[in-house]
Amino acid sequence: MERSDRRPVSRLLHRWPAVRLTLLLATPLAWLLLVYVVALAALLVTAFWSTDSLSGEIDKSTWSLDNFRTLFENEVYRNVTLRTVGVAAAVTVIDVAIALPIAFYMAKMASPRARRWLVVAVLTPLWASYLVKAFAWRAVLSEGGLVEWAGGVLGIESPGYGLPAVIMTQAYIWLPYVILPIYAGLERVPNSLLEAAGDLGASNGRAVRTIVLPLLLPAIIAGTIFSFSLTLGDYITVNIVGGANQMLGNLVYVNAGAANNLPLAATIALVPIVIMLVYLAIVRRTGALENL
Amino acid sequence: MEPAIALSGVTKHFGDVRAVDGVDLEIADGEFFSMLGPSGSGKTTVLRLIAGFERPTGGTIRLSGTDVTGAAPFERDVNTVFQDYALFPHMSVLDNVAYGLRVRGVARRERRERALEALAMVRLPDVGDRRPTQLSGGQRQRIALARAIVVKPKVLLLDEPLGALDLKLREQMQVELKQLQRQLGITFVFVTHDQEEALTLSDRIAVFNEGRIVQLGTPRAIYEDPVSPYVASFVGTTNLFDDATSQRVLGVSGSHAIRPERLSLGPADATSNGTGDLVLRAKVVEVIYLGSANRVHVRLEDGTPVVVLEQSSGSLPAPEHRGDEVTVRFARADVVALAGDTEKSGDTQ
Amino acid sequence: MEPAIALSGVTKHFGDVRAVDGVDLEIADGEFFSMLGPSGSGKTTVLRLIAGFERPTGGTIRLSGTDVTGAAPFERDVNTVFQDYALFPHMSVLDNVAYGLRVRGVARRERRERALEALAMVRLPDVGDRRPTQLSGGQRQRIALARAIVVKPKVLLLDEPLGALDLKLREQMQVELKQLQRQLGITFVFVTHDQEEALTLSDRIAVFNEGRIVQLGTPRAIYEDPVSPYVASFVGTTNLFDDATSQRVLGVSGSHAIRPERLSLGPADATSNGTGDLVLRAKVVEVIYLGSANRVHVRLEDGTPVVVLEQSSGSLPAPEHRGDEVTVRFARADVVALAGDTEKSGDTQ
Amino acid sequence: AGCGDDEGDGSTEAVEELGELEGEVSILAWPGYVEDGSNDPNVDWVTPFEEETGCEVTSKVYGTSDEALNLAKSGDYDVIAASGDLSLRLIASDEAQAINTDLVPNYENVYDFLKDTEWNTVDGENYGVPHGYGANLLMYNKSAYDTPPTSWSAVFDPAEMEGVKGKVTAYDSPIYIADAALYLMNTQPDLGIENPYALDEDQLAAAVEVLKTQREYIGEYWSDYLKEISAFETGDSVVGTTWQVIVNNIKNKDVEAILPDEGATAWNDTWMLSSQAEHPNCAYKWMDYIISPEGNAAATMYFGEAPNSDEACQVSPEAEEHCKLFNAGDEEFSDKLWYWRTPIKECLDGRTDVECTDYAQWTEAWTEIKG
Amino acid sequence: MTFSTTTRRLLAVATGLVLLVMYVPLLVVVANSFNANQAMTWPPTDLTVEWWGKAADSAGVREAVWTSVQVALLATLIALVLGTLLGVALSRYSFFGRSSVNLLVILPIALPGVVTGIALANGFRAILGVDLSLWTIVVAHATFCIVTVFNNVQARLRRMGGNLEEASADLGAGVFMTFRLVTFPQLRSALLAGGLLAFALSFDEIIVTTFTAGGGAKTLPIWILENMFRPIQAPVVNVVAVMLIILSVVPIWLAQRLSGDTDALR
Ligand SMILES: Nc1ncnc2c1ncn2[C@@H]1O[C@H](COP(=O)(O)OP(=O)(O)OP(=O)(O)O)[C@@H](O)[C@H]1O
Ligand SMILES: Nc1ncnc2c1ncn2[C@@H]1O[C@H](COP(=O)(O)OP(=O)(O)OP(=O)(O)O)[C@@H](O)[C@H]1O
Ligand SMILES: NCCCCNCCCN
Ligand SMILES: [Mg+2]
Ligand SMILES: [Mg+2]
């Protein structure tokens, strides 16, 4: 076996799968742990500190639950949290509701050729800057803007700036991120299952409800992770079209980036962290996390 | 009585491909009907047309006399057992089986009972709580069957239901399928490309080629009176003699065929002994032990290769080794005259 | 001479599952060796142990006398033809075939030549430029074969290489495989659960059950002298008589078996006529037309079910319908006495 | 001591003389303060500076004073353009070092009323040189009013806002609380507000109350001017605070801005030297350049605020025009302005009997106001 | 599967409508890039190509685009390497803590950007003591881009099964040669798909970038955000957006060409 002598490393790796696994995992895990987990942990710790208001220095010597007290006792935070979760949920529901039929058409009805074009068509808007799109919606929704301009005859009125505008704009911006996983998920649902359902007497609607949707759930959830999390943390769209409203992202941003109160920002940031962790824990069993 | 299924002039084109090309077919109530043919010959497409998954390009389809050409699958009293089973992976076995009842609005309790009955019928009474992935191939196959029969369709369509099973299991399932069909009295339309399976199970067989039915008849008729070399060579092993060979060997013109089991081997010096049988000298090329028989490849004096199937029935001495001189004997009556070309289709590279 | 492959005391556990359980096995150079057994009996695992994809939990594996127990697949002079072919989809057929040469650093030119040679050997000289996806199942199978033989391994491992092919093609490939093996003189280790295939092709067969070899011998020995009811019923169809039945029917004690093709049917009033054959009265339960034969299920007077295989050799009148009274005749010499229990294993639900 | 060898230790002693130029300088400023032609080749006052001094400029802009403080702490910047609400915070957190105005020759031109103010001078030490200044004006759309407003009550008095409900706008920063305080100073003298940046808890609560009421009428808050411009252009907003530069950029003829009777809050920006400056010598050069008549005129004209000297107003006819528009050097006008300061516990109005609310409290209050 | 013509038409119309709604705001952007009114009010009263000229002259845009391309390329590259390693590890081995690793990879994309942003910014500055720069953006982006590559790689490897790799080893190839000749080519379109998505995510990222960008590093979104504060520049932003949309056809087509299937576009 003269060949073997030339491959000491290959042989070693073959002999010790654990070594192979360790080599594979070492770098990415170190990266994620050192860069991300440590940073998150540090943020959590920061939540127990406070800031000197004039100098902006963080006082690390005293640990207290003051920030948490502020968070829980001040009604504002509860309202903003509820508002934000509401907006994120609405965006997610709208996106899923829109994405399902589109993705279904793309995956199960369009010809392969049309399918390619549809995928491109859905993806292209991703490349127009997020900020530009948000501002474009400002023009669409403004007084005398596109909605009223075009809908004038029909008497359509723009909802103006406010939460509905935020929901519409966010739903618009994240829609491709929801369509894609659902489309991919639908492609994985064998046609024969739909046929079997029809064959057994289920109408198309029934087949979709009882067969496609349950099988698609992981893919749908994968899509919702995008739309929900991206909306949960957004503070820019709400600034642009949100009227006088603020969301959790604004509070975190204002305290961290502006008010220079990182401890309070960290405390507020725990809210979306906890929400997302709970959400992930719930959906984990569905296999959604492998469909992102 | 109206035939359970009647196709007249049914055609299905996919773009340029004529998957089904003018099929006329009547299948009687309670018949076990098989469609046999090479890959791509249109068997599945015919089935899908009957089930309603495809709409024909031309022609009409009638079920028990009613025109269903444009009807949706869920409007037809026909059920399908899919080749890949198409079990719903997110439902338990019981829910799978009960699905057809559920969409018909049958109450939960009755649903459960009837599903359990169907499971018992396919002899899997205890797997109701499992997921389809927790079953073996053979078990899944039976669940697919149970799911289809639970709604008591008039017609059951089966697309190579045994294709994925191993031989042993397959033989076992063949027996069960046949029994089930008899027991339920349902019309079975069965697609296979395994000729032995078709012969074993069917009341009638349609042999397909390139979207057309090339022969339609009982297993015996198909096997013993193939209308063309194509059918002869596709159904079972056969010795095909083209015109020239026939003249040389049999002394008659036209294409002819004779089945290996109709031939027997004798000692090199055997003669016809006045029986009227033909006795030809040959040399053994290869002996293949099949357990229940030997398949002996010989070469006649003029070089024509011939296959002889010798059942190990104990009475004949097992033919010896390659190179031995032997005689091949057969009755003239067993030679079948064929119409059509001698080109052997159905051969795959 | 050292055996090409020698396994001694080889065991492989996956967690609690004993996939292979103390296998001792020697395979001679140039032998066509088959492993036969039901699903899950450990055949694939043995193959993967020989190839080096798995490391044994215990025991040693030697190739031509060299201990390779811990060696990597790429260190072994053994090649595998995978059941799903495992052709590299991103390479042309030629590149697939030349792959083993490429990783050995053979120059492009020689690579090409030898790959073309191998393609010619599997009778596909013209498909070199295609992608594997552009080939039919049978063609892919041959490419997988060409890819494995191009590096001239001492041993070729084949894991159900014909499993995915349809019957017609499968028979054709069996012949070609056998020819190729003869031509190259390579040791073939062949996994199948198709007993007919094993009988047809092999020099020797190992019958597996639950990770162990239950019988090892020539096809004839396995078929005609099964050591246990398990082997008897797994290899071929057989009529198994347990102790009680044997006493009743044959008048001897112990388990016995007789092959259906050793039985013949006669008219209801036939007698043994002093031949010493046993002649038993029976009633026809079912006649299954197999084309080349009829499989007749009968029931003896005491209720014992018996299967008779009647070759359609033309001379015997085809047995008539269910319910007919007949006699079953067989020679005592064809009855095989079995050791071991009568429990029929190998049945899959 | 020479310059540049004691950076980073937060020394507050101003240097005596300049050292060798480092060849580069890093600047943190409001958008539009440091233009090098990369956005518009016609808008460029950085290149002449670079050519003159050989100091290569890199710059970063910020959106609000609060964000700037955060960025300044990174220590990446040598010079910082700070509004009054930021400058004291920079000094308090040791991010700024005292400067020697003798090393900034153009300092002498600067209007006196901008020199040695509370937001650029602490304990007699100068922490920077004044750049330009402007007022937070009241902007409105004439067509929405029968009689155009003249007082901040237009955005604080519910009765006046009723007709324009949902179309009122306000500046999105805690510092805007001072605007409400200024309004209260005039309408509720009982509260005793002397300085809108020095509010005790009760006074803050009163201001917050005003703002919470105002919140009901707000269409949107603004912090970037594009939003403000487009909102007034389309009519989504019809009244609210503004900057002169925004007014100038609105084409809608119905929109105009005034300095209301009560006066207004305002900003005066200061160029400050970072205590962590790695290029202090180039930084001094920049400070001198940007308050020079040419540099200052260019920057303040582009941004839309009053320049810091009469000399700057005289560099060109356009500059003269500009200065008139922005009331440059008009002390009377300037007297009506309450320049942004950082609210701190120690009351800026000199009261010692109470503790005032600090910026952190204002921030919290602002969060609450927006709700 | 057959669907009634009505269903088909209904869904086709729905798809068309949604696409229309998806493109209308983009058309507004295009229109505004020619809108003489710099506040981008609708409908445009006068048209002008002034902004296109300004955009063409703007060195700032060019630099920002180049910075973004650099950041996105580097982040994508890192994500490709780390995502592939993780994908291989998790699809070819089962080990204790496997699902925790899986969750860990997803976390950076699942947690809102503002959280990731402040955590990383604080981590870089307070813990690691490094100055924010182009590199800190790259690190931050790479962290949340890993998951897109990881998911594509994992899905592909699972579909591919282990047979091809075994076949390669069987034919004599060592671990690295197998990766180079068999695994990698199989992964190529998955990597392309994951890489493309990673590139898109990074290229357009603003929130995390805001927190992790140092003074010298100005990505395009940051440039756009800054210029939104500069009224005179705002319409130029629209020109840039239009250019981006047009240019995006390049990577999308490239992906189609290279992979030959729509797989690469997910
Ligand atoms: N949806 C389709 N689109 C295009 N061509 C199709 C489609 N379905 C089937 N065909 C073509 O129609 C012909 C008949 O196919 P069909 O599946 O009916 O054959 P089959 O007899 O079932 O073959 P097999 O034994 O391989 O299952 C083939 O040439 C096939 O390629
Ligand atoms: N990687 C594995 N992990 C766990 N169990 C395994 C693994 N591979 C095989 N087994 C188990 O080992 C036993 C033997 O499997 P093996 O694949 O060798 O059977 P086989 O005889 O090849 O069956 P088949 O005919 O179905 O291919 C089975 O019970 C199987 O479930
Ligand atoms: N197209 C903009 C996408 C922005 C995605 N940001 C992801 C950050 C997740 N923490
Ligand atoms: Mg088919
Ligand atoms: Mg196996």
Image: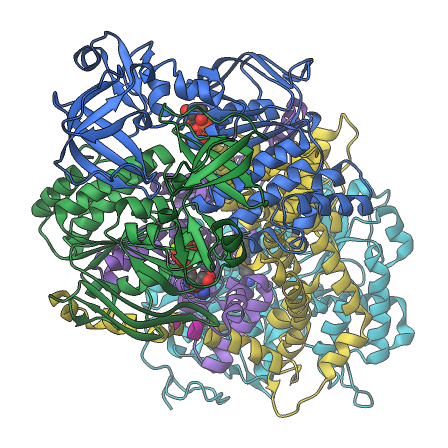
Chain colours: A yellow, B blue, C green, D cyan, E purple
Q: Position of residue D203 (x, y in %)?
A: 84, 76
Give whichever of E118, E259 is nearer the camera.
E259
Residue at screen point 82% across, 75% down: D204
Residue at screen point 41% across, 22% down: B223
Residue at screen point 34% across, 18% down: B230
- How many tags in the picture? 0
- Asked if residue C48 is among those painted magenta in the image, a careful observer would answer no
In the orientation shown, which residue stands out farthest toward the front? C274
> Which SS does the magenta portion mostly show?
helix
Residue at screen point 85% across, 65% down: D210
Left or right: B31 as drawn, with respect to B277 = right
Q: Where is residue C223 in the image (x, y as percent from the top left)?
A: 34, 50
Q: Is residue E90 visible?
A: no
Q: Give the magenta range.
A: A27-31
Left or right: E169 as drawn, with respect to D284 = left
- Asked if residue A28 is among those painted magenta in the image, a careful observer would answer yes
Image quarter where the C terminus of chain A lies is bottom right
Q: Is residue D168 above or below residue E136?
A: above
Residue C324: image quadrant is top right
Residue E10: image quadrant is top right
Q: Where is residue D309 in the image (x, y as percent from the top left)?
A: 55, 65
Give whichever of D304, D343 is nearer the camera.
D343
Left or right: A197 as drawn, with respect to D240 = left
Q: Is residue B311 above or below residue E133?
A: above
Q: Is residue D139 above or below residue B312?
A: below
Q: In this view, does D99 lie above or below B180?
A: below
In the orientation shown, which residue stands out farthest toward the top? B253
